[in-house]
Amino acid sequence: MKKGKNGFTLIELIIVLVIIGILAAIAIPKFKDISTRARFASVKGTCGNVRSALSIAKANNLITDTNSTNNYWPLAAEVQLAESAANITNPLCPLDSVMPNEPFRNTNTIASVTEGAATTRSLSVGGDGWNYCETNGQFYANTNVLNTDDSMRANEY
């Protein structure tokens, strides 16, 4: 009976490990880049959706003139109701779902900022996920993580 080859030689195993190491060295940075891009896409999508909802609420306030401050943007307290699912049915809440987490700070808290801070897109202290100014309707992410694809920070979207 002929004795067959059983298993792999040490050289074959080393070559396979080297190939796997090279593939991992290429794939891991690409995966990190994809997850960062996904976070920026989430920021852009959420900001667009919330800004649309705020514009609709402003138009509704213009028609009905129910906003007591007469700037017609929803009040910060009304927007902050969206932080909790229990408040979504509140008729003052301009959003129809719970505010999603800001993907870099992982919190859905909405901080009220001044008009000056909103105009310059300044960040608020305390780790809030989103910033909102009821005076001019500015809504943006409360993080300055840089998107290397287009050299914009998350709070600039």
Image (tube, rainbow, N blue to C red):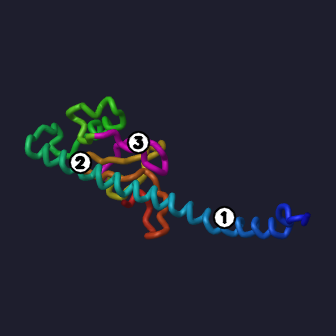
Q: Nearer the viewer, mark 3 or mark 1?
A: 1
Residue sitting at the far front: 1
Three-letter code, disc 2: Leu
Mark 3 residue type: Asn
1 and 2 marks in contact (CB < 8 Å): no
The C terminus, quarter of image: bottom left
Observer-nearest residue: 45 or 75? 45
| Crowdedness near tag 2: few (<14), some (14–19) or many (≥20) residues, C-alpha within 10 Å | many
Q: Tag 2's secondary structure? A: helix
54 relative to 142 in the view: left or right: left
Residue 108's disc number: 3
Between disc 1 and disc 2, whose residue precedes? 1
Residue 147 lies, in percent from the top left, at 47, 64
Horizontal and vertical percent position of residue 8: 83, 64
Estimate the spatial distance between the alpha carbons at disc 1 and disc 2, rounded to whole Å: 45 Å
Image side of residue 13 versus residue 132, left or right: right
Dot 1 lies on which element? Answer: helix
Residue stretch rendered in magenta on the structure: 97-115
Q: Which of marks 3 and 1 is nearer the N terminus?
A: 1
Give neighbour class at mark 3: few <14, some 14-19, many 20+ (Cα, 10 Å): some
Real-space Cα distance between discs 2 and 3? 17 Å
User: In the image, what residue occupies the spot 25% across and 32% down?
Assistant: 89
According to the picture, the residue beneath numbered tag 2 turns out to be 54
Per the image, the residue denoted by label 1 is 24
Looking at the image, which residue is at 32% across and 38% down?
82
Of mark 2 and mark 3, the one earlier in the sequence is 2
